[in-house]
Image (tube, grey):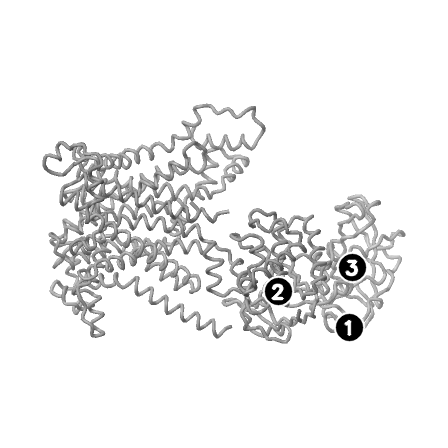
Amino acid sequence: MKASRTKERVTWIIISVLVLLYALFPVVSIMATSFKLPSELTSGKFLPSSWTGSNYEQILVGSAQDLFLSSLRNSIGIALIATFIAVVLATLCAYAIARLDFPGKKVILTTALAVSIFPVISIVTPLFNLWRNIGLYDTWPGLIIPYLSLTLPISIWTLAAFFRQIPWELEQAAQVDGATTWQAFRKAIVPLAAPGVFTTAIIAFFIAWNDFVYGISLTSTEAARPVPAALAFFTGASQFESPVGAISAAAIIVTIPIVLLVLLFQRQIVSGLTQGAVKG
Amino acid sequence: MTAAEVVARDAVTRGGTERRGRRRPPGRTVLRLLPLSPAVVLLGVFLAGPILWAFYGSLTNAALTGVAAKDPQWVGLENYTELLSDPDFLQSLWLTVIFVLVSAVLGQNLLGLGIALLMTKASKAVSAVVGVCVVAAWVLPEIVAGFVAYAFFNREGTLNQLTALFGIEGTDWLFTVPMLAVILANIWRGTAFSMMVYQAALNDVPEEITEAAMIDGAGGSKRLWYITLPMIRRSIATNLMLITLQTLSVFTLIYVMTAGGPAGASTTLPLMAYEEAFRYSDVGYGTAIAVVMLLIGAVFSVIYIRALRERKG
Amino acid sequence: MATVTFDHASRLYPGTEKPAVDGLNLEIADGEFLVLVGPSGCGKSTSLRMLAGLEDVNAGRILIGDRDVTDVPPKDRDIAMVFQNYALYPHMSVADNMGFALKIAGVSKEERAERVREAAKLLDLEEYLDRKPKALSGGQRQRVAMGRAIVRNPQVFLMDEPLSNLDAKLRVQTRTQIASLTRRLGVTTVYVTHDQVEAMTMGDRVAVLKDGVLQQVDTPRALYDRPANVFVAGFIGSPAMNLLELPVTDGGVQFGGMTYPVPRDLLGEAHGSTVTLGVRPEDLERAEDNHGLAVFVDVVEELGADAYVYGHTEFDGKRYEITGRVDGRTPPVAGSTVYVRPKEGHVHLFDTQTGLRLGEHAPGTPEASVEDLNVPVEAGKTAD
């Protein structure tokens, strides 16, 4: 058995490497592109013949600076705020759903999930009109609110699944031990709920961060334009020519922190999503 | 009283002495619904609202510019009947179904399952690295993913560089096989989700059961078919539902890669909705398409749920 | 039906220094019911899993019959296993659970149904054949797990603590059922448990393990009467044997104010200045004439027919805990002092440093008989 085990293991390692390549390859190619000179971009070579940081310069301190840095600021701010609000609201919602019994519980959950898949494209127009009328166009709240509608359904769903798993008797046990209701909640339940809330926050952040359609449609200046939308503007028209280098550099800058987040919190993210998917 | 206190009080008294009767004071239900309200209101106004407007809009001839923009007229189901006889729509419908079936149901699903199975066998270090890489592809903003895929498939792109190594000259894949390109790109991007779902589901299968199957004489593939897969059936259905719905509405990726072309060869429904609404300015028509998408999503969901329910119990 | 042999089998988990199973040598006869018993972590489950093929064997061999199965995958070993948590396939009915292995083996549907029915009859499961495991009680699930094993007609049955998850009453009931069933079927059975009562009542022979090393393998009677070392002595029998480390003096061991005589050649075998003396609670009797060991009674447990007396005695500044069994109808009172002495011929002596039984040259081999130690307690001197 030992001989065949080793052979098996080697096969799996080979397959893993292939998968790795498949997943990494495009990312690596973007990284390579970000270091290429504009002249090289269509040269057809994979790696740059001379590595240059000019693209990064351009977007961080150079001509594209306004566009990029402001969008970075917007993205971070808007995504964080939207995440915070979404998590707070979702926690309340999920708490009620997981613990209380009331008519229409299932309906609410299912509807929430169902509407969340409605193609964003089609909602944009009415929102666009509404925002123009009430002055939320091209503002941070103007994006935060739609982001909430993007993130709330999945956050509620995920958190509800998480909360359902918590043994609520711990609260009673703490009360029997002499804690007040609030103390029981804080000491017994919060530590258990914390991972779920944290994971939901991360997922919500991703969703808010990655949005493109709202970002493009509901903004018009650097005042509120988030990064994914800004990237589209790097191109100017729909010809992807020289700005590709700058775009690649911007993409790298935008992606690296996210990848790091994923690296650090992968286990939590997986369990968060799958709590909903597997057990929800 | 906070909701927590209400709940705690209920919990303690429920487990305590017998109460006289089960009379629910009317205030209780309202109280219980309170924590839900902010979220529900928000979703109601900013999500359901626009959706309802969209429904309504699809029954008008609303447009972005022109007479119909200022004063949309009710046209009833005219948009929908027009859709059904519009060959572009039918083609788009067909392309969408293909896109969803191949890239999600087959591609992401099977690949995700495969990778998850692989990770159960591989060492911790290997599976950690693979996991991160696959997930990284998923968390890339869709637009970046679109750029990457574009850079890969276009005439001067990386794919052709690779084939050049073998002496084959490639074409502009985005032009010649646009659907294939977007399908491959979507598989690359979205597999991570399925992988994660299956990873967790496989983890939940108790080791003992796999061992019992081993002792019962079942080798790897038999175990997979008779034991493992049936045990994660629920996850399979949930996963399929989620990735189908998500893939149905993929827009940015395709738009960046092919813009729906050439000549509509890769125009899935979301792209067509966008074009009708923004390019041709026929918002009513575009929205009708979106509604159709919703219906398709619902149909798929029902199929999945049915397929799951059948074998339960 | 076949014999089972562990030939210097060892299992060392990667990254650890101490083997989980260290050079296990065990020969199990055809049709024998052998119990592997020991405290948690002693390697009994690991040994069973090595036999099943679920654990790698890092050294030595495992044989089933004459066949070296050390590198054979579990599915080809022709064994059946009952797991502690039953490991029933949750998505299959009882009948499908029991018939799964046969299905894999390609047995025809009719024959499968027939064999499943037979086994179900044996285990009183006929009315549950269509149910799913989650609709069964713990005891029923346990029977299904057994049925799954029986249906296969394997060469060896492996059972990994199958009764641990049952409530006490059911455990006793099922214990006898398992024992009689396996006897009737005549299949070689290897049974793992941490409960020495199960071991003693069910096994033809019992193998005691500690820290991966086999301590003694023998019939329950022999283990009880002639434990090969201190560990076995203290593990087998409930309540545990009283084990007292006593200083060696001229002619015997110092026991309180008395000298308990021990033959010189046995004393000579011992290393160090002390010897461990063992006497079971049921082998202590009251000394009416108050010529015995004075025990201050702390707690009395009355169990109906018997009563167990837990007390202590002190001398030389050392405190010794003593447990004794008395007739349940006339138990002493807590707080009083009773005088006890060991029954003739029921004293065990062990080397304090090695733990081995004195007078024996290898564990499990009866040589010097206990009667040599049958020396009455010296009257006269009493303890304080």
Dot 3 corresponds to which residue?
A: C279
Dot 2 corresponds to which residue?
A: C211
Nearest to viewer (mark 2 / mark 3):
2
Query: What is the three-letter code of the residue carrying label 1?
Result: Gly
Q: Is mark 2 on a helix, strand or loop?
A: loop
Residue in front for this viewpoint, C288 or B179? B179
Query: What is the three-letter code of the residue carrying label 2?
Result: Asp
Say which chain tag 1 marks.
C
What residue lies at 13% left-to-right and 31% top-to-bottom? B71
Task: For marks 3 and 1, give the CA distance.
Answer: 21 Å
Using the rendered image of the protein, determine whether residue C185 is visible from the camera's viewpoint.
yes
Q: Position of residue C362 (x, y in %)?
A: 73, 73
Query: In the rendered view, does C21 fall on the left or right side of A18?
Result: right
* The disc label shown at residue C268, or none: 1
Circles 2 and 3: CB distance less than 8 Å? no
In the picture shown, does residue C282 fall above or below C275? above
| First-in-chain label (3 vs 1) | 1
Q: Quadrant of the N terminus of chain B?
A: top left
Q: Position of residue C136 (x, y in %)?
A: 59, 48
The answer to which image quadrant residue C210 occupies is: bottom right
| First-in-chain label (1 vs 2) | 2
Q: Position of residue B242 (x, y in %)?
A: 35, 48
